[in-house]
Amino acid sequence: MTSNKKKILYIGSVQMSAEFLSVVIKDSRFELCGLVTKNSSRFNADFYPLAERVPSSIPVFYFENNLMEMETWIRNQSPDVIFCFGWSHILPKELLKFPKLGTLGFHPTLLPANRGRHPLIWAIVLGLQETGSTFFMMEGGVDDGDIVSQKKILLAENETAASLYQKVIDAGVEQVAILLNHLEKGEFKRIPQNHSFANSWRKRSVQDGVIDWRMSAESIDRLVRGLGEPYIGAEFVYKDQIIKVWETKIISSIMPVNREPGFVLESDAEVFTVKCGYGALKVLKHSGAEIMPNTGDYL
């Protein structure tokens, strides 16, 4: 017996993808006809094995840089629509147009602003007060297709990568449920992006995560919060060892003006305070307990 349910092909490989996938699985109005994911990832710190979320009856394709094989496999599943949420690889333009209802993508900013790489990290590091959760039609460009759902997300004063990640998940889960209602009707409400308001964030380099104590205490604190879990952490080198920094606190008291950036003002068994280019920062959580800097050291 042939089902009249619309068929969804799902692509994703991170924690966020898994939470959105759960919404799709729970909606009995649709058929999940296949999952494209990975067994592991060397560059997604928030990698999640999505195959664990789907019933054993769902076909799964594990991507290993074989685009042609993946495209053929997807076409054989005959999806009505593709959901591609949390995926770092470019999909062929012909594949995006293959499903009759198109391919939906996801980007956690207020598109058309802030397209590109590492959107949650940059939002915190740059000190933005708001970002967003945007679902859009993938059409071959970079995050530039018609918007089908968008929610604004406000950043708290001490927002961390983990707390912002959860805010985006919470917003996206609500949006996916609404998008499924639109899908049942056979169409999405599309709003073209105004490309004149667009910018694109670059890929973060290793050097972007290195703490330079000549920066202001505020800037370093944002860097630490932006690169915290589930990401790789901000870092500095001390005694030839990389020290990861996970939590800091800006010191509001007046700092000595005759101490250079990187000077350790105070140190005890667990925390230490460092003079910055402007202000000072107390390092509360870090990976270097076995080689704690002493008061008077330079970092």
Image (spheres, rainbow, N blue to C red):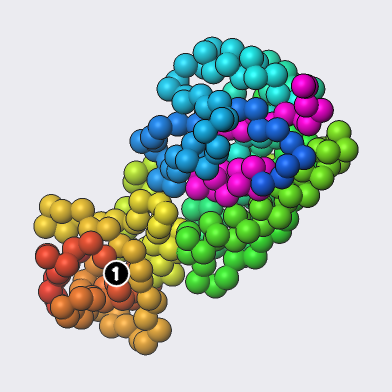
Looking at the image, which residue is at 30% across and 62% down?
A: 245
Between 53 and 75, the residue placed more toward the observer is 53
**Figure quadrant of residue 292:** bottom left
Was residue 21 drawn as part of the magenta stretch in this picture? yes
Q: Residue at x 83, y 42 (%)?
A: 182
Q: Dot 1: what SS? A: strand
Q: Residue type at mark 1?
A: Lys
Occupied quadrant, residue 236:
bottom left
Residue 45 falls within the magenta-colored stretch: no
Q: Which residue is mark 1?
A: 285
Q: Quadrant of the N terminus?
A: top right
Judge by depth and name the residue closer to the eye, 293 or 34.
34
136 over 233 or under it: above or below? above
> Residue 233 in the image: x percent, y percent?
35, 55
Residue 49 x %, y %: 45, 40
Instruction: Quadrant for the C terminus, please.
Output: bottom left
Numbered marks: total: 1
Q: For this view, does 238 lie left or right of residue 250?
A: left
Residue 272 makes an appearance in the image:
yes
Coordinates of residue 178 in the picture (x, y in percent)? 78, 49
Is 41 placed left or right of 296 in the picture? Answer: right
Look at the picture and state if 122 lies above or below 217: above
Residue at position x 56%, y 26% from top?
59
Residues in magenta? 1-25
**Residue at horizontal 52%, vertical 13%?**
69
